[in-house]
Image (spheres, helix red, strand yellow):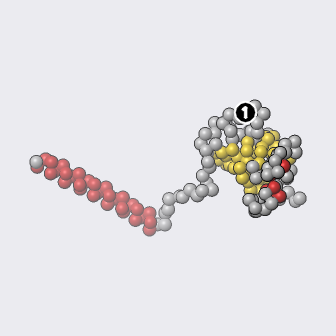
Amino acid sequence: MKIGRTVLLVSMLLFLACNAGNTGLQRKGEQSGMKKPQLTRQDMIAPGTCRVIAIVKQIRSDYRGTGQDDPCSRVPCRALIEIETVTGCGAGITQPLPLHQPLLAHFLPTLNPKVAFRGTKYPDVAPLYVGRRFEAIVEVPAEPAAGSVPVIVQKYTVLQSSGK
C-alpha cells in the first residue's frame, strides 16, 4: 500500500512539475509577443489544385458553348497559357506542371467574366487578353482523358496591365 501511495505521489509531482514548466514557457512567449502562425483560407490549396502565376499566350476561339445559358457561347473560355511559377499545390498532385511551355487551359469564369455573367457572378474580375499575367487556382486532373484540357482555371486575379 505504501508503494502505491508513493508511486501516486511521485506521479502527481512529476505531472505538476511538467505543467508548471509549460505554463512558464507559455507566459514567456505571450510576454515577448510571439504568436503561432495562422494559415489563412488564402494560404490553403485544395486537393487536386495548384496556385500558379501564368501569362496568356493565345486566346482560343475554336471552342464555343452551345447553350444560351453557357457563358462560353458569349465569350472565349479557352486559351494557351504559359505557367511561369507554381507557388503551391494541394494533395494529390503527382505530376509537375510544365513551366514555360504552351498549355491549353479552360477558364471556368471565362476570359471576360463581366460580359459572360453580365456582371453578376464575378463583378471585380478584369478580363484576360494576350500578354496579360495572372495568378490562378488551377484544377489538374489526375489522369486527363485523351483530347481533354490539361488544366481548368477555377479562379484568377490579374497581376499587371500590359497597356491595352
**SS class, disc 1:** loop
Residue 151 rendering spot, x and y as whole percentages: 73, 42
Looking at the picture, does residue 105 appear above or below residue 75? above
Q: Which residue is mark 1?
A: 145
Q: Residue at x 79, y 41 (%)?
A: 104
Q: Residue at x 32, y 58 (%)?
A: 19
Left or right, 19 with respect to 47, comes to: left
Q: Quadrant of residue 26?
A: bottom left
Residue 72 at least partly seen: no
Of 23 and 76, the residue lying toward us: 76
Q: Residue at x 36, y 62 (%)?
A: 23
| Quarter that holds the C terminus | bottom right
Looking at the picture, does residue 61 appear above or below residue 31? above
Left or right, 2 with respect to 112, comes to: left
Residue 107 rendering spot, x and y as whole percentages: 77, 48
Of 156 and 52, the residue lying toward us: 156
Which three-letter amino acid code belongs to the residue tagged 1?
Answer: Ala
- State the residue lying farthest toward the top: 146
Q: Residue at x 75, y 31 (%)?
A: 146
